[in-house]
């Protein structure tokens, strides 16, 4: 029979994963490296505003002087609890970024800027 202590103990793989996560969150990440993580889809930005927190390695990160620092577990939990509300609030006051030119003032939804009908 397995004791409760043994049954609830983390496996070696879980301990290794936890140790790796602690090493990641213990050191700041340079801005360039964080941008690469975002581009690769390994990190995500809360919203499109300067200094917006970034979610990476099960934590939220904050920027300070070109470096990103992991919030502690309590800070990350707080951001998690408010993230949807912050995204929604930000979306109501900031128009989405798009890459094309603005449509002409009298254009229909499927008519691009500069086109006439």
Image (cartoon, rainbow, N blue to C red):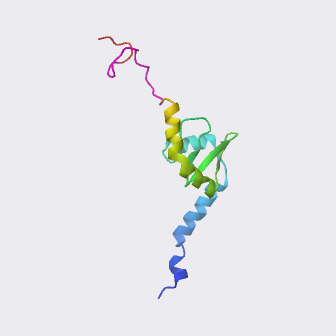
Q: Most extreme residue toward the right, as rendered?
A: 65
Q: Quadrant of residue 21?
A: bottom right
Whether residue 108 appears in magenta in the rendering, the answer is yes
Q: Main secondary structure of the magenta part?
A: loop
What span is colored magenta in the figure? 96-111
Q: Is residue 67 magenta?
A: no
Image x and y of residue 72, in percent: 64, 56
Query: Which quadrant is home to the C terminus?
Result: top left
Q: Is residue 36 above or below residue 110?
A: below
Closer to the camera, 33 or 113? 113
Q: How many marks?
A: 0
Residue at (43, 19) in percent of width and height: 102
Question: Is residue 43 visible in this depiction of the protein?
Answer: no
Question: Which residue ends up furthest to the left in the rendered image?
Answer: 117
Q: Is residue 100 above or below residue 20?
A: above
**Which percent across, then down, holds residue 86?**
54, 42
Residue 67 in picture, x, y percent from top left: 67, 43
Residue at image point 33% right, 19% down: 108
Residue 66: x and y in percent read 67, 39
Q: In the figure, residue 25 lies in which quadrant?
A: bottom right
96 to the left or right of 50 = left
Left/right placement of residue 39 relative to residue 64 reads left
- Residue 87 in the image: above or below residue 2: above
In the depicted structure, whether residue 9 falls above or below residue 75: below
Q: Is residue 46 left or right of residue 70?
A: left
């Amino acid at each position: 029979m397995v004791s409760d202590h043994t049954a609830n103990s983390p496996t070696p793989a879980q301990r290794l994963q936890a140790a790796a996560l602690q090493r990641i969150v213990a050191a700041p990440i340079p801005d360039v490296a964080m941008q690469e993580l975002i581009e690769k889809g390994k990190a995500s930005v809360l919203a499109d505003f300067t200094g917006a927190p970034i979610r990476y390695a099960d934590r939220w990160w904050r920027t300070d002087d070109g470096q990103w620092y992991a919030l502690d577990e309590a800070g990350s939990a707080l951001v998690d609890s408010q993230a949807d509300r912050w995204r929604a609030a930000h979306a109501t006051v900031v128009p989405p970024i798009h890459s094309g030119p603005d449509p002409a003032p009298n254009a229909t939804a499927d008519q691009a800027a500069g086109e006439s009908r």
